[in-house]
Image: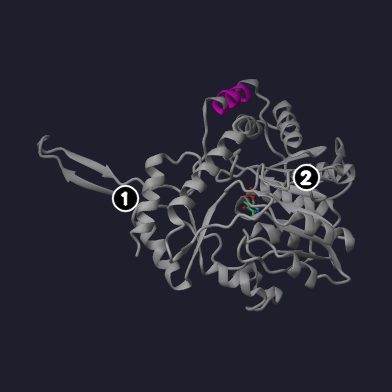
């Protein structure tokens, strides 16, 4: 958005004032990433290689899993994880509808049935009580999403899965380094997937990683992501090309070295926002559950459904790039209509999707940006 003014001191010249938008996400790329990518480009080893292996080793040791298998995206990592876990036609997988569409698409690619459980209205995460109510003879797995960077109630969910002989899959696309009762998410389930898309807490551009302690799942994942190949031109299954490149891994290595700092900044920004916004009576600041260390992929507040869309317009008109994650439960998307889900299936998810709005919280926000976000929000009513 720009306004052109005639500058009275510079006759005939015009000055362009660009009103700066505080963006919802911004990748923090520094010299380290540029140096590492340059090394890769000079080496000529543009595809899989030493940088990929190093990134996998570093990230797996940080999360606390035996294996890390890098992928071309978070979606390909999650899809591969589901397939490597042995999920297929006839199986049911329980998951949340209040997430990015890729979470349930990963199940649909395997031709299993997606069974939606409702969420806890305070945390926005899947509700263990609802999970139990959806278990049938066909249930094979539970796929949880640590939404906005806050871990799900993993002790309860792990126990439900163990008691019912179900696999536990974690979608950690928004939760790099988040912990539940001292344990990193991504190390609690049987297999999990991270995303390093450009808006996530750490980035490679496009990219993802599968984490697991299970040797068989790890081995199968490596085959799936590489054309089903076990030895050169020996293809034991119809696989994909879901591989990460050295260029992406180089960015990831640079990012990984600053993840702790970037997360600390997100936490600082979130507590500043909550401190300043908690007095507003028409707005509910985010709730952090006991035992959860939240990594603030998003800072999401709740307002009355009648206010949400006008608040969204107001914030964006005034330079605060607020977003709605997510405006409808996945089963209400046009792409899911032929699957037979009905409105009313998950009432909490439906209600919350009309009331949430996320404010910028990323590590590149300045003190002035944070002050402006608070001021603009307070100016709404
Ligand atoms: C971003 C995201 C994905 C998909 O990751 P991509 O890298 O964009 O493919 C999956 N699940 C959730 C919850 C996400 O936020």
Q: Which residue is mark 2?
A: 187
Where residue 211 appears, x then y in whole percent?
A: 77, 43
Asked if the residues shown at circle 2 and circle 1 are in contact, with their CB atoms under 8 angstroms apart, the answer is: no
Image height check: is 295 above or below 40? below
Specify whether tag 2 is near ligand 1 (CB below 8 Å): no
Q: Residue at x 60, y 53 (%)?
A: 148
What is the secondary structure assignment of the residue under circle 1? loop
Where residue 281 appears, x then y in whole percent?
A: 43, 65
Image height check: is 54 above or below 114? above
Q: Residue at x 56, y 68 (%)?
A: 352
In this view of the protein, can residue 66 be seen by the observer? yes
In this view of the protein, can residue 134 be seen by the observer? no
Q: Residue at x 64, y 78 (%)?
A: 344
Principal SS element in the magenta part? helix
Distance of label 2 from label 1 (alpha carbons)? 44 Å
**The stretch drawn in magenta includes residue 163:** no
Quarter of the image holding residue 5? top left
Position of residue 196 in the picture relative to residue 213 (left or right): left
Of pointers 2 and 1, the one earlier in the residue sequence: 1
Q: Which residue is mark 1?
A: 1
Image height check: is 90 above or below 243? below
Where residue 331 appears, x then y in whole percent?
A: 65, 70
**The stretch drawn in magenta includes residue 34:** yes
Q: Tell me the mark number nearer the camera, choosing from 2 and 1.
A: 2
Specify whether tag 1 is near ligand 1 (CB below 8 Å): no
Position of residue 379 in the picture relative to residue 322 (left or right): left
What are the residue bounds of the magenta stretch? 33-41
The mark found on residue 230 in the picture is: none
Of 70 and 49, the residue lying toward us: 70
Of 95 and 218, the residue lying toward us: 95
């Amino acid at each position: 958005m720009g306004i052109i003014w005639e500058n009275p001191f510079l006759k005939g010249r015009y000055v362009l004032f660009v009103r700066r938008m505080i963006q919802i996400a911004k990748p923090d790329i520094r010299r380290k990433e540029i140096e590492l990518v340059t090394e890769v480009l000079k080496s000529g080893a543009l595809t899989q290689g030493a940088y990929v292996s190093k990134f996998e080793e570093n990230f797996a040791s940080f999360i606390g899993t035996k294996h890390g298998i890098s992928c071309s995206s978070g979606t390909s990592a999650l899809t591969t994880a589901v397939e490597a876990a042995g999920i297929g036609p006839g199986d049911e997988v329980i998951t949340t509808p209040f997430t990015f569409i890729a979470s349930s698409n990963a199940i649909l690619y395997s031709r299993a049935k997606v069974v939606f459980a409702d969420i806890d209205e305070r945390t926005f995460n899947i509700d263990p009580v609802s999970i139990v109510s959806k278990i049938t003879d066909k249930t094979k797995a539970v796929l949880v999403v640590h939404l906005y960077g806050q871990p799900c109630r993993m002790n309860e969910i792990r126990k439900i899965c163990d008691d019912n002989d179900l696999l536990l899959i974690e979608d950690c696309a928004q939760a790099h380094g988040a912990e539940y009762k001292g344990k990193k998410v991504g190390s609690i389930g049987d297999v999990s997937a991270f995303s390093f898309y450009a808006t996530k807490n750490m980035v490679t551009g496009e990219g993802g990683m599968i984490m697991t302690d299970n040797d068989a799942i790890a081995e199968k994942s490596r085959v799936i992501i590489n054309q089903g190949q076990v030895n050169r031109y020996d293809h034991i299954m119809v696989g994909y090309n879901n591989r990460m490149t050295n260029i992406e891994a180089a960015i990831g290595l640079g990012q990984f070295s600053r993840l702790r700092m970037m997360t600390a900044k997100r936490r600082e920004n979130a507590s500043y926002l909550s401190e300043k916004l908690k007095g507003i009576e028409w707005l509910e600041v985010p709730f952090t559950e006991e035992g959860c260390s939240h990594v603030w992929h998003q800072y999401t507040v709740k307002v009355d459904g009648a206010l949400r869309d006008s608040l969204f317009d107001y914030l964006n008109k005034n330079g605060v790039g607020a977003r709605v994650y997510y405006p409808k439960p996945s089963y209400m998307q046009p792409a899911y209509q032929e699957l037979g889900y009905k409105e009313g299936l998950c009432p909490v998810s439906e209600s919350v999707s009309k009331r949430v709005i996320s404010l910028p919280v990323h590590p590149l926000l300045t003190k002035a940006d944070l002050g402006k976000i608070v001021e603009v929000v307070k100016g709404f009513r």
